[in-house]
Image: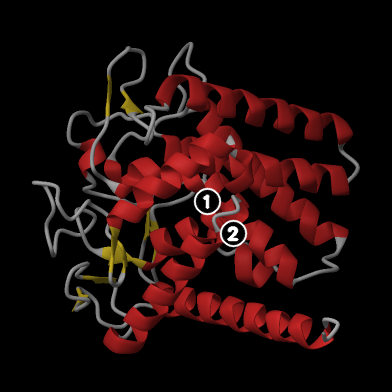
């Protein structure tokens, strides 16, 4: 577990923040990345059962510091929701959500942090830290309420400038990424997000900017192309929210895209052509995850069919 998950936390700074990037020659702290680690840890723990208490405690401590960074350094005075200081902090560097303002409260950030706090609750409970588990749950519930009350715009989430009443929407897929919360969203909200995600689908998967948007760019980084990480998060959230057919469809389209165009950093949403770096590990990793999950579901379905009573 430590070798898989802990590496990035070896570079955690005194404030609890994680670096923007780590390479053989440098570690950059000019930006951060979103608190996606709770979502990732939840998936890892399903495949790595029986982790010892010492390993869990080290992971819990590091992830608690990372969460506290977002709840302190990235919350403006009097605000419940945290904010990004720059599009680079979100991983969606130039998404159109960040066009109006640099400091942005967005539902994807809130959703990822809620998922992380839910995972911290589970870890704290496992470690016998009942009081801390209660605090994480309370904070997660507060964030969820603020996200829905402040940012929900009826068919997608809006973005907001901290400390103001200024909100805006865009045709970026980023405004739909809170679907990663899955069944932690109200059913009406997840259904509206699912409907809107369908409008972003091309033959190859979900475009990061709506293809009919005047700001769509075929090779515009996060302003149009299909990316592996956003695809996996959407597929997983939709599946946990009960939108199984749409999740299956997205999985199938992305797997077919990789089988046709390889494992590029991203893909032209309308032609399926690989863009930028043509051999990217996260694209290959997402393909393998989706393919393995599809294979397991298919095997389970066949086993169920074989064991069902015959007429």
Q: Which of 87 and 238 is in front in this view?
A: 238
Is 306 on the left or on the right of 42, as rendered? right
**Residue 15 pos. (x, y %):** 53, 36
Residue positioned 24% across, 31% down in the render? 102
Q: Report the quarter where the C terminus lies.
A: bottom right
Q: Residue 135 carries which label?
A: none
Q: Which of 222 and 170 is in front in this view?
A: 170
Q: Which residue lies furthest to the right in this view?
A: 128
Q: What element carries label 1?
A: loop
For mark 1, what is the residue?
Answer: 36
Above or below, 28 against 43 in this view is above
The 10 Å Cα crowd at callout 1, few under 14, some 14 to 19, many 20 or more, is: some
Disc 1 + disc 2, Cβ < 8 Å: yes
Colour scheme used in the picture? secondary structure
Q: Report the quarter where the N terminus lies.
A: bottom right
Residue 174 falls in image quadrant: top left
For mark 2, what is the residue?
Answer: 40
Q: Which of 96 and 190 is in front in this view?
A: 190
Q: What element carries label 2?
A: helix
Is 303 on the left or on the right of 95, as rendered? right
Q: Which residue lies furthest to the left in this view?
A: 214
Residue positioned 57% across, 58% down in the render? 239
- Can see residue 14? no
**Residue 21 pos. (x, y %):** 38, 59
């Amino acid at each position: 577990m430590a070798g898989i998950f802990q590496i990035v936390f070896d570079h955690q700074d005194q404030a609890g923040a994680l670096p923007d990037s780590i390479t053989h020659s440098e570690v950059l702290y000019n930006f951060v990345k979103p608190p996606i680690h709770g979502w990732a840890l939840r998936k890892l723990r399903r495949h790595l059962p029986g982790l010892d208490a010492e390993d869990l405690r080290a992971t819990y401590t590091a992830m608690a510091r990372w969460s506290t960074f977002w709840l302190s350094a990235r919350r403006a005075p009097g605000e419940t929701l945290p904010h990004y200081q720059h599009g680079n902090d979100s991983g969606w560097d130039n998404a159109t959500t960040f066009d109006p303002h640099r400091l942005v409260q967005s539902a994807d950030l809130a959703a990822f942090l809620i998922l992380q706090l839910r995972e911290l609750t589970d870890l704290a409970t496992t470690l016998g830290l009942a009081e801390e588990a209660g605090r994480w749950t309370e904070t997660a519930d507060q964030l969820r309420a603020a996200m829905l009350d402040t940012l929900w715009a009826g068919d997608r989430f809006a973005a907001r400038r901290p400390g103001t009443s200024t909100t805006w929407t865009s045709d970026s897929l980023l405004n739909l990424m809170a679907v990663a919360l899955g069944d932690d969203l109200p059913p009406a909200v997840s259904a509206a997000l699912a409907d809107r995600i369908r409008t972003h689908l091309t033959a190859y998967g979900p475009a990061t900017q709506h293809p009919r948007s005047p700001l769509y760019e075929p090779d515009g980084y996060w302003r149009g192309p299909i990316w592996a990480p956003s695809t996996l998060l959407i597929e997983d959230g939709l599946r946990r929210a009960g939108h199984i057919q749409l999740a299956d469809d997205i999985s199938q389209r992305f797997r077919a895209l990789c089988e046709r165009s390889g494992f590029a950093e991203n893909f032209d949403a309308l032609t399926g052509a690989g863009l930028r770096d043509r051999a990217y590990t996260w694209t290959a990793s997402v393909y393998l995850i989706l393919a393995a999950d599809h294979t397991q579901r298919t095997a389970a379905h066949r086993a169920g069919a074989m064991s069902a009573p015959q007429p």
